[in-house]
Amino acid sequence: RAKSTGGDASVIYDARMTRQASGRLDLESDLRVALDRGELCLDYQPVMDLDADAPIGFEALLRWNHREHGLIMPDTFIPIAEETGLILPIGAWVLRETLRQVQQWRTEVPGAGGLTAAVNISGRQLVAKDFPDVVEAAILAAGIDPAAVHLEITETVLMGEPDLPKESLQRLRRLGLGISIDDFGTGYSSLSYLKWLSARTLKIDRTFIWELGIDSHGGTVIELVVGMAKSLKMDVIAEGVETSGQLTELRRLGITLAQGFLWSEPLTSEQVPAWLNTQTALSRTQEFTPREA
Ligand code: C2E
Ligand code: MG
Ligand code: MG
Ligand code: MG
């Protein structure tokens, strides 16, 4: 009896496994054509300057509007894109499209001329030999100031790529763009490594922001990161800020840049110009910006 129950359970388990595996195969083949079918799109989340209470730029976040399954989030399909290598054409498109879009806002939305564009980069892209060419081509095509471009690389990716091409990083640096370490605090980067990368920005992982007020450990980590970034002359962005309580605490800890639902969820590209117009600090600078007739 016990044996037959076990048998039944494993049959159900196998069926579920098979369904999951074939579901994944479907997603994989669908992802191969998603880019050509125009099913991929980008949302944009503002990065806020807390002192000016104004946006300094946007991070592009990839979404997949699957024809049957509807909206699929990046945590579901980026791993598939990375394993299959599809992240290379997809990532190149993300770079081109983000830089084109942000440069359009910089030129067309009053007061938005200084906005930065942050793009998430996978390890697979970073180690590709032609990566600096892909980035340079996207910058030239968009006509955007390279200094306004930030490449976000997660700390764990950096740790996992011992063969990071040194020349690639040097070329990217010479282009004048900024490198941000994403999800900072979840990996184990050393100070000397951060210096060698000459990253411009540390983005503190949102788990540390959520620990604020619950666990004193959260505040300690943020304080340490702020101090370290100061001596390395780096910027710090707090990610995933949701409450005004967290904001108060972050200000007290010396944080001046932040991102999160407190200001805005990721917006569609259509929503961004209207959202920018609601930003008082942005429209105030407009008064002092001479505009063409
Ligand atoms: P990430 O780069 O750390 O992006 C931040 C994630 O936190 C986004 O999730 C964003 O929607 C979410 N978020 C922002 N503010 C809040 C908040 O206040 N509360 C909460 N709960 N969440 C917040 P999303 O869009 O699902 O992206 C997840 C991850 O997928 C990103 O993490 C990034 O690692 C990856 N990703 C997204 N777009 C791309 C891309 O174009 N290329 C690559 N390689 N990876 C991407
Ligand atoms: Mg990011
Ligand atoms: Mg992050
Ligand atoms: Mg992340």
Image (cartoon, rainbow, N blue to C red):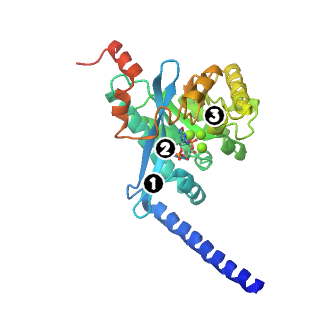
Image quadrant containing the N terminus: bottom right
Which mark sits nearer the N-terminus, 3 or 1? Answer: 1
Q: Check mark 2 vs ligand 1: CB closer than 8 Å? yes or no.
A: yes
Spatial CA distance of label 3 from label 1 is 28 Å
Asked whether the beta carbons under mark 3 and mark 1 sit within 8 Å of each other, the answer is: no
Query: Quick check: which quadrant has ligand 1?
Result: top right
Residue 85 coordinates in the image, percent (x, y): 56, 57
Residue designated by label 2: 61
Identify the secondary structure beneath mark 3: helix
Residue ID at (37%, 32%): 275
Res. 141 in view: no
Give the percent coordinates (x, y) of residue 149: 50, 32
Q: Quadrant of residue 224?
A: top right
Badge 2 crowding class, 10 Å Cα cut-off, few under 14, some 14 to 19, many 20 or more, is: many
Instruction: Kindly check if marks 1 and 2 are in contact, taking CB atoms under 8 A apart as contact.
Output: no
- Please name which of the two marks, 3 or 2, marks the residue nearer to the observer: 3
* Total numbered labels placed on residues in the image: 3
**CA distance separating discs 1 and 2:** 10 Å
* Residue at the image position 58 percent from the left and 47 percent from the top: 125
Q: Is residue 140 left or right of residue 243?
A: left
Q: Residues within 10 Å of mark 3 (few under 14, many from 20)?
A: many
- The residue tagged 1 is 64
Residue 103 appears in view: yes
The residue sitting at 59% across, 47% down in the picture is 122
Q: Is residue 78 above or below residue 32?
A: above
